[in-house]
C-alpha cells in the first residue's frame, strides 16, 4: 500500500540519489501522495504518485495545480511553498505529504 512503508531505495545512477515517498494524506476529495528524488541533500525530482482524479473537475484542478506545486518545491527545496488558488485542499494534502517525505529524507 503506498505511503505505509516510507522506505528509501537507491537509484542505479551511481550517485547518492535516492527516492523517498511521503505519507498519503487524506483530503476531502481523496488522498495526495508525493515521492521525492534526493541527491546531494537537494530535491532533484518530485512525482505526485496519488491525487484526486475522480471527476472532471478534480482532473482540471490538479492538471493546473500539481505542476505549480512541483515547480515551487524544486525552487524552494522545502515544504514552505505557496498554496495554489482554487486548489487549497490539494495544496494542503501535497504539502503534508511533501513534509513527511522531507522528514524521511532528513531534509
Image: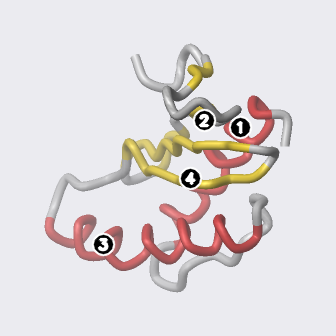
Q: What residue sits right under mark 4 in the picture?
A: 93
Q: What residue sits right under mark 3 in the picture?
A: 63
Looking at the image, do the residues carrying marks 2 and 4 touch, with CB atoms under 8 Å apart?
A: no
Looking at the image, do the residues carrying marks 4 and 3 touch, with CB atoms under 8 Å apart?
A: no
Instruction: State the quadrant of the C terminus.
Output: top right
Instruction: State the quadrant of the N terminus.
Output: top left
Compare residues 37 and 51 and report the one nearer the observer. 37
Q: Position of residue 65 (x, y in %)?
A: 43, 74
Helix, strand or loop for disc 2: loop
Q: Position of residue 71 (x, y in %)?
A: 56, 73
User: Mark 4 and mark 3: span between their CA atoms?
Assistant: 15 Å
Q: Position of residue 11 (x, y in %)?
A: 53, 28
Looking at the image, do the residues carrying marks 2 and 1 touch, with CB atoms under 8 Å apart?
A: yes
Foreground: disc 2 or disc 4: 2
Is 78 situated left or right of 20 in this image?
A: right
Foreground: disc 1 or disc 4: 1
Q: At x 35% / y 68%, what residue is drawn?
A: 62
Say few, some or many: other residues with alpha carbon within 10 Å of mark 3 (under 14 / 14 to 19 / 20 or more): few
Q: What residue sits right under mark 2 in the picture?
A: 22
Instruction: Establish if 14 lies above or below 95.
Output: above
**Which dot marks residue 91?**
none
**Which dot marks residue 100?**
1
Compare residues 9 and 49 and report the one nearer the observer. 9
Amino acid at each position: 500500500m503506498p505511503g505505509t512503508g516510507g522506505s528509501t531505495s537507491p537509484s542505479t545512477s551511481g550517485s547518492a540519489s535516492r527516492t523517498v515517498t511521503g505519507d498519503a494524506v487524506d483530503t476531502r476529495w481523496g488522498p495526495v501522495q508525493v515521492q521525492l528524488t534526493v541527491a546531494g541533500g537537494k530535491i532533484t525530482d518530485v512525482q505526485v504518485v496519488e491525487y484526486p482524479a475522480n471527476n472532471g473537475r478534480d482532473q482540471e484542478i490538479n492538471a493546473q495545480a500539481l505542476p505549480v506545486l512541483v515547480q515551487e518545491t524544486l525552487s524552494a527545496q522545502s515544504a514552505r511553498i505557496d498554496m495554489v488558488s482554487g486548489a487549497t485542499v490539494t495544496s494542503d494534502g501535497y504539502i503534508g505529504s511533501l513534509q513527511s517525505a522531507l522528514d524521511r529524507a532528513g531534509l
